Amino acid sequence: MKTITRSEEETIKVAEDLARRLDKGYLVLLSGELGAGKTRFVQGLAKGLGISDAVTSPTFTIVNEYRGRLPLFHIDLYRLERFPEEDIDLDEMLEKGVAAVEWWGKDRSFFEQYKPRVIVSIRVVSESEREIDIAWEDSSEK
Amino acid sequence: MIVLGIETSCDDTGIALLKDGRELLANLLSSQVSIHSVFGGVVPELAARKHLATLLPLLHEALEKSGVSLEDIDCIGVTNRPGLVPSLLVGLTFAKGLAYALGRPFIAVNHLEAHTFAIFLEREVEFPFVSLVVSGGHTSLFFVEDYGKMQFLGGTLDDAAGEAFDKVAKLLNLGYPGGPIIDKLARKGDPNAIAFPVAKTPGYSFSFSGVKTAVMSWLKKHKDYKVEDVAASFQEAVIKALVAKTFKAAEYKKVKNIVVSGGVACNSRLRELFTKRAEEEGYRVYFPSPKFCTDNGAMVAFVAYYRFLKGERAYFDVDVASRV
């Protein structure tokens, strides 16, 4: 499903609505160029999950964890070449809550095995407009 | 008394030996050891693995250089927060192992406190002061009343300032690390060429995600431009926001001293603008030397030293934390 948002607030709102439909075990995969608003989107997810802490960029820490209705694991592969499975236990995170991954395209095949997942693609239309494509892939489709 | 400082919160491994809180016997960074061949090129793994391979050779080198033996170490200081969890774990576990084997106490150190007090390795600063820690992973303001007595005033709501430098450098195809590259280019550019907006944020918080997006949008709309002007204008916007909030904090807290540390504190324009504003308004601003601005083990040893003197000891069940 594609939606056009006209401001950061609208983008956050779309993410917030999506988050309300998430359950334990869901993986949210985000793509979009630098500055498209992936972290903004995750801030909306956090809001929808009832997280009150400020969600900051995980670029340097690779993973940030937040407590809410469900725990949210915010992961960023920007500085990496692939998912560091030796150091980050994605399965364990998904047992506890929801994981959102930025720059997942760097290791597309690694995420193949994970269902259910939501693929969020953010395209820059203009300075303030974004086209957000949300695709739900549930376990039933396996 | 000799304190061993261990820093592994991000990419660089730092080991230092500090005597009596002032004499630096050794201060080594991973990049100074020729272990690169061990990795055989770039292996896309987290820094944790690198820390694991680096710590022991680095410690040996530090001991050898300073003529100190393991048994001479009285206390171990180690960064346990905030940072990259797997990386922090390597450092903390290493410290615990050493502490246990040597029968010496260890102290878990906050990385941001270590940056704040790095200046004390070179000179003392009169309390109270306002501290800005600005790097690739952090942008935080503190009110500092005494050794280890810090109050968090505010930090970034999204990207750290140094991260914005890296990402804008990437947008401009300038390579990595972005900070020093932009700093150098900006000297040949006009800082007022383009007005990049920095988001207005409440209190003592910062936001640098928007200015990155503004550069991205601007580059899409313009074909003919001087990359030096873009670099200079972006840098100016970020630094002005840092200066504004830091002096606002100093004014509010009624302090006359300001300490700016962290990797971004190496930036020449940042030093210039902070110094200028301080001179105009009667403040004193202090920057550690570049080698103490970037991550290092010495600053961790220093914090461990004064915490040890206060009687603090860490328990073996102390853990790491990605956020403070």
Image (cartoon, rainbow, N blue to C red):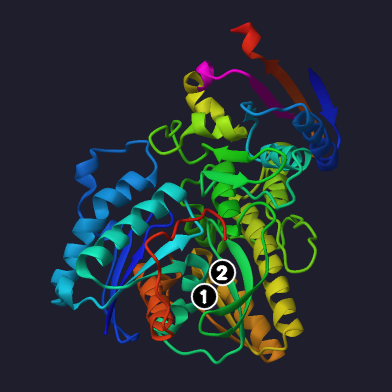
Asked whether the residues under the numbered discs 2 and 1 touch, taking CB atoms below 8 Å apart as contact, a structural biologist would say: yes
Circle 2 Cα neighbour tier, 10 Å, few/some/many (<14 / 14–19 / ≥20): many
Taking the image as shown, residue A6 lies to the left or right of residue B255, namely right
Stretch of the chain drawn in magenta: A111-124
Residue at image mark 1: B116
The quadrant in which the C terminus of chain A is found is: top right
Residue B260 in sight here: yes
| Local secondary structure at mark 2 | strand
Q: Which residue shows up at 48% across the image and 25% down it?
A: A107
Taking the image as shown, residue B284 lies to the left or right of residue B177, namely right
In which quadrant of the rendered view does residue B277 lie?
A: bottom right
Give residue A36's position: percent from left, percent from top: 70, 36
Is residue A116 within the magenta segment?
yes
The chain letter under disc 2 is B
Residue B267 in sight here: no
Give residue B186's position: percent from left, percent from top: 57, 60
Residue at image mark 2: B133
Q: Which residue shows up at 41% across the image and 83% down it?
A: B311
Give residue B34's position: percent from left, percent from top: 20, 54
Taking the image as shown, residue B149 lies to the left or right of residue B251, namely left
* Label 2, label 1: how far apart the Cα atoms are: 7 Å
Circle 1 Cα neighbour tier, 10 Å, few/some/many (<14 / 14–19 / ≥20): many
The chain letter under disc 1 is B
Kind of residue indicated by mark 2: Val
Kind of residue indicated by mark 1: Thr
Give residue A130's position: percent from left, percent from top: 78, 31
| Local secondary structure at mark 1 | helix
